[in-house]
Amino acid sequence: KYPFKRKKRMGEERWYEKISLSYSGQLSNSIRTKEDKVLKSNIIKDWRNGVKHNIPVSATFQLFDFINITPSFNYTERWYFKKTEQKWNPETNKVEKLDPQYGFYRLYNYNAGVSLSTTLYGMWQVKEKYKSFKLQALRHTINPSINFSYMPNFGNQKYGYYQTIQSDSTGKTMTYSPFSENAYGTPTSGQNMSLSFSLSQSLEVKVKSDRDTTGVKKIKIIDDLSISGSYNFLAD
């Protein structure tokens, strides 16, 4: 989880010791067919399979002792063994699938981001001369956060994950992925550079209570009132 942490730490924790790294892998192999045909099927040609790897990296640092900064990076890689291309056939006037191509196909995608968050507290208590009042104290908590994220356009032709072909006799085109029939789909098409924010707050009061051994009772007036939004700078 924390690969750079010292086994025997002396002094303060160093910045790289806060880096968290993990790995998860998935293997899928499935088929939909009749029972008497399962043993006769070809594991590469007839089965829907694939391998998926995911490596998330993140860390949390503090700025001015009260702002949390969390950079993150996520890498995903898919291994496939088949792709099926399509082509416009002018004789039949329709898009047709070509024969599958078998081999080793590596598809990857990644995204990165950074978030800032903090917690602000406000406290109000009645003065001593007003201790006879039922309301004794009020506590207001605010949690603001802001996040910036970026993901390249993996629909770009240079990656080869998607292809554009003619789709009808008028010359219109369509975009498809030759790898869409595999187990874990394809990386998302479209570039993304987003800024998002959220603001949540809660309000709690203390009132006098004869039923409580402490003489006061906490009551939540606002449990979680929040607002959030996001904007993609690269969207159409």
Image: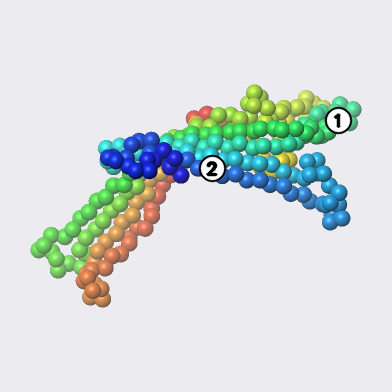
Place of residue 28 in the rendered image (x, y in percent of width and height, measured from the top left): 68, 47
Disc 1 marks which residue?
93
- The quarter of the picture where residue 105 lies is top right
Work out whether mark 2 precedes mark 1 in sequence or the reverse, and give the earlier one: 2
Place of residue 224 in the rendered image (x, y in percent of width and height, measured from the top left): 38, 55
- The quarter of the picture where residue 144 lies is top left
Q: Is residue 96 left or right of residue 6?
A: right
Q: Depth check: give the residue in front, 210 or 71.
A: 71
Disc marking residue 23:
2
**Of the two numbered discs 2 and 1 in the rendering, the one whose residue sits closer to the viewer:** 2
Q: Residues within 10 Å of mark 2 (few under 14, many from 20)?
A: few
Q: Is residue 93 left or right of residue 146?
A: right
Q: Residues within 10 Å of mark 1 (few under 14, many from 20)?
A: few
Residue sitting farthest toward the left: 129
- Kind of residue indicated by mark 2: Tyr
Place of residue 124 in the rendered image (x, y in percent of width and height, measured from the top left): 20, 55
On the question of residue 146 being in view, the answer is: no
Q: In the rendered view, would you say 56 is above or below 138?
A: above
Query: What kind of element bears circle 2?
Result: loop
**Residue occupying the point 38% across, 46% down:** 199
Disc marking residue 207:
none
- Kind of residue indicated by mark 1: Asn
On the question of residue 174 being in view, the answer is: yes
Q: Depth check: give the residue in front, 70 or 228.
A: 70
